[in-house]
Image: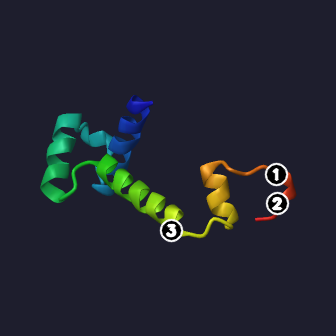
Amino acid sequence: MIVYRKLFERKCYRKLLRVSWTQKMTNQELCEKIDKHCNCNLLQTVIDRKLQQLCGHMCRISDERILKTLVFGMLDVPLKYISL
């Protein structure tokens, strides 16, 4: 799973930096280019920060909300009976 995430991450960086497949840039060169253009060199740090923000948001909302119930897996009623 980690391999696929890294492949996806590199693909996203190549699109963001507009690196064409014809340029034949190695992963090492891509990492150097990312470090030069970005303050945050890892996509994983951005994902972790957003996940922490989401968890904080989910903990602050009221317990009666269906979204919180679904996320924390405390729902007793099958999903087909709930209209979101």
62 vs 52, left or right, is right
Question: Percent x, y for residue 19?
Answer: 28, 49
Q: Considering the numbered disc 1 on the image, is that residue within a helix, a strand or a loop?
A: loop
- Can residue 66 be seen at all in this image of the molecule? yes
Which residue is label 3 attached to?
A: 60
Q: Considering the numbered disc 3 on the image, is that residue within a helix, a strand or a loop?
A: helix
Distance from Cα at disc 3 to Cα at disc 2: 23 Å
Q: Considering the numbered disc 2 on the image, is that residue within a helix, a strand or a loop?
A: loop
The kind of residue on which mark 2 rests is Ile
Which disc is residue 82 wearing? 2
- Can residue 14 be seen at all in this image of the molecule? no
Residue depicted at 60% across the width and 70% down the height:
62
The kind of residue on which mark 3 rests is Arg
Distance from Cα at disc 1 to Cα at disc 2: 8 Å
Question: Percent x, y for residue 21?
Answer: 33, 41
Q: Nearer the viewer, mark 3 or mark 2?
A: 3
* Vertical position of residue 32 compared to residue 69: above or below: above
Which residue is label 1 attached to?
A: 77
* Vertical position of residue 39 compared to residue 64: above or below: above
Question: Percent x, y for residue 31?
Answer: 19, 43
- Answer whether labels 3 and 1 touch (C-beta < 8 Å): no
> Looking at the image, is mark 3 or mark 1 earlier in the sequence?
3
18 vs 36, left or right, is right
Of residues 31 and 77, the one drawn nearer to the viewer in this rendering = 77
Q: Residues within 10 Å of mark 2 (few under 14, many from 20)?
A: few
